[in-house]
Amino acid sequence: MSQRETVIVLDFGAQYSQLIARRVREAHVYCELLPWDTEPEQVMALNPMGFILSGGPASVYEAGAPYLKSYVLESGLPILGICYGMQLLAHQLGGKVAPATQREYGLAQLQISKVGQSTAIFDQLPNEMTVWMSHGDRIDAMPPDFEPIAQTVNSPLAAMGNRNRRIYGLQFHPEVAHTPLGKDILNNFLRRVCDCQGLWTPGAFVEESVSMIRQIIGDSQVVCALSGGVDSTVAATLVQRAIGDRLTCIFVDHGLLRKNEGSQTMRLFQEHLGLRVIMVEAQTRFLKRLIGVEDPELKRRIIGEEFIRVFEIEAQKLGQVNFLVQGTLYPDVIESTSVETRAAQKIKTHHNVGGLPADMQFKLIEPLRYLFKDEVRQVGLQLGLPPEIVFRQPFPGPGLAVRIIGPVTPEALKTLQEADAIVREEIEKAGFGRTVWQFFAVLTPVRSVGVMGDGRTYGKLVAIRAISSQDGMTADWARLPHELLAHISNRIVNEVPGVNRVVYDITSKPPATIEWE
Ligand code: XMP
């Protein structure tokens, strides 16, 4: 194992905790986001070089509020507290936190005082900068031996530090884009305070993973469900690097793929990536089970179950297999444990086709378990995967079934595939392929009157959905040029039989979601 530099982000329930972890990774330092009450042994086993304490919605003096466990302060390691994290430091180190009369929320001008000793986190930065504030309580008195190092009009103590103890606190959020120099502040903490060099690179990750996978798998046989998406492809390629042909991939064509997608993806797997792939043509099976099903969650469940069944049958044919590769990413791991989502409401079941067959006798190999999506793409490039895989837009596991509103039929599938192919071809041709996060067609059950030639038509309504987003969690509709939309609409009504009307979806997420179902 290489000498990995690790920083721990303790999550106190802030909306932005994941962002902190992403920023740290962008600074080439490995970090893990763990709930504030994680067992000390588990945290210290990671051999951290420092801690970052996230913000959170609580007040430090509330009964039952999350607190900083003593091992963190006792470790003597560098600590950066952000917002609630800073208040905790103040409260637990002998300072005073007071309930705010007014919540401070929004942009503020930060004045940095560089007269003290404790300004390492502002080194090489201007004396004044814009920052994003979002806090209720404020700090009235610092703990002994701390210095005030920055202020805003409303927060005379916007940042504090103790150089000797290597502990810093920020009342504002350096992790959000609204704090333009926030990255540099975090970088300073990581490099100048924690002494990290920034060894976390895609190359180092590949090397480390390949040797770890080899060790874990030994001489066993491994199976992987490929979907054609970037996650499962990168995961499979990594495992193949480690163990070669002892990996067999299974690609289930459930018939809900985009036009020509099955054959194109297979060609890519075999010719470009040299993966050993078995393709299962299971269209009829899936379509049969979906007859008459309208409810989107039921569609998801059926497709998920059917997928597992098909996968099991194929995997059994392979004989003795011990491991199953999955492309699980870090946000999924965080989601299952985070403070914030312990009580979160489920909007959709994002079942990933290729998901875990719960009762199968495999041990799991999840080589991307600690990566964010952008890191997976970097690793993909490092492994030499072609851009059409690395930058592929997200495609839901249940495929076109959740883009056909109402029952899925072979006719509806054909109509949607044709319309969708036009949407994708034209948006890509116009050069928006990389900047628009997702773009696709949706087939609605709405029928409307039209006129073609001299005759009346009563045809189907297709919607175009194109959105910009950073992570799929929130999204805005893409401001595509009217001419492009006009051209797409024109082509769809002329080329796709049965469609006589096209609309453009101009709703953001929230309140809508990206997919219509
Ligand atoms: P929504 O529609 O919830 O979508 O705004 C957010 C992102 O998730 C994708 N999505 C899915 N992915 N299985 C998946 O693997 C699903 O059932 C599913 N539903 C939505 C969607 O395409 C978008 O990228």
Image: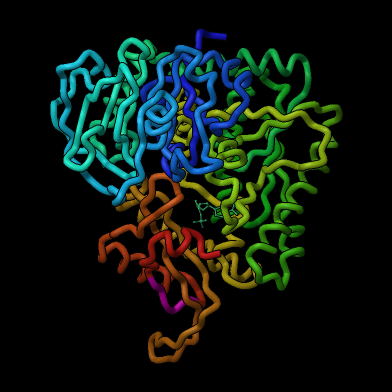
Instruction: Please provide percent x and percent y for residue 181.
Output: 23, 31
In the picture, the quarter occupied by the C terminus is bottom right
* Numbered disc total: 0
Q: Name the side, left or right, on which 334 lies relative to 167.
A: right
Q: Does the magenta stretch include residue 214?
A: no
Q: Main secondary structure of the magenta part?
A: strand
Vertical position of residue 514 compared to residue 388: above or below: below
Please identify the quarter of the rendering in which residue 225 is found: top right
Q: Does the magenta stretch include residue 502?
A: yes
In the image, which residues are magenta? 499-503
Q: Residue at x 63, y 65 (%)?
A: 296
What colouring style does the render use?
Answer: rainbow
Please identify the quarter of the rendering in which residue 289 is found: bottom right
Vertical position of residue 185 compared to residue 390: above or below: above
Q: Say which of 85 and 100 sits in front.
A: 100
Instruction: Please provide percent x and percent y for residue 299.
Output: 67, 62
The answer, for residue 274, to whether it is visible in the render is no
In the picture, the quarter occupied by the N terminus is top right
The answer, for residue 191, to whether it is visible in the render is yes
Q: Say which of 469 and 20 sits in front.
A: 20
Q: Which residue is drawn at 61% across and 62% down?
A: 401
Instruction: Please provide percent x and percent y for residue 434.
Output: 36, 44
Q: Which residue is drawn at 76% across and 53% down?
A: 306
Please identify the quarter of the rendering in which residue 145 is found: top left
Instruction: Please provide percent x and percent y for residue 472.
Output: 45, 49
Q: Say which of 40 and 508 sits in front.
A: 40
Vertical position of residue 341 compared to residue 489: above or below: above
Q: Name the side, left or right, on which 336 lies relative to 497.
A: right
Q: Name the side, left or right, on which 287 lies relative to 180.
A: right
Q: Residue at x 33, y 51 (%)?
A: 429
